Image (tube, grey):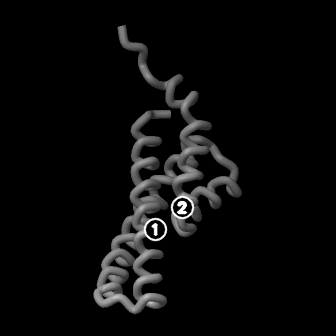
Amino acid sequence: MKKSVLTRYRTMAYVTGVLLILLCLGMVGKYLLDLSGAGDFTKIVGIAHGWLYIVYLIFAFDLGAKAKWPVGKQIWVLLAGTIPTAAFFVERKVSAELAPLVARDEPVAA
């Protein structure tokens, strides 16, 4: 497996995870704390998270297909972008699991 496949998944996992945390904080500010401007912040971050989550799904699916994961594992990785902080934990586990596959595919530098 190429390193770029794992790298782009990892990047989108972090981006999706950060945006989801920001979205949750915005929702708290909007609905619990009645902060002015929290509604606009929540709207912008929600739209960004929605579009970038689609990119995350594409990259995660591509990674799972190349790693030949079973369907259950693939679904868990795909859903990790919808649960606050789950993307970080799942990304760590996936990266550790796939590191040997990436290392095998890398050419040895002379």
Residue tagged 1: 21
Q: Where is residue 42 shown, x and y percent of the image?
A: 37, 81
Q: Where is residue 23 shown, x and y percent of the image?
A: 42, 75
CA gap between label 1 and label 2 equals 7 Å
Instruction: Say whether marks 1 and 2 touch (CB < 8 Å).
Output: yes
Q: Nearer the viewer, residue 42 or 28?
A: 28
Q: Amino acid at mark 1?
A: Ile
Residue for point 54% across, 49% down: 91
**Quadrant hosting residue 48:** bottom left
Question: Helix, strand or loop at disc 2?
Answer: loop
Q: Quadrant of the C terminus?
A: top left
- Mark 1: few/some/many CA within 10 Å (<14, 14-19, 20+): some
Residue tagged 2: 85
Using residue 110 as the reference point, say whether residue 91 is left or right of it.
right
Using residue 94 as the reference point, say whether residue 110 is left or right of it.
left
**Quadrant hosting residue 77:** bottom right
Residue for point 59% across, 52% down: 90
Q: Where is residue 74 shown, x and y percent of the image?
A: 62, 55
Residue for point 42% across, 14% down: 108
**Above or below, 53 relative to 62:** below
**Above or below, 61 relative to 94:** below
Q: Where is residue 13 shown, x and y percent of the image?
A: 46, 55
Q: Nearer the viewer, residue 74 or 42?
A: 42
Question: Helix, strand or loop at disc 1?
Answer: helix
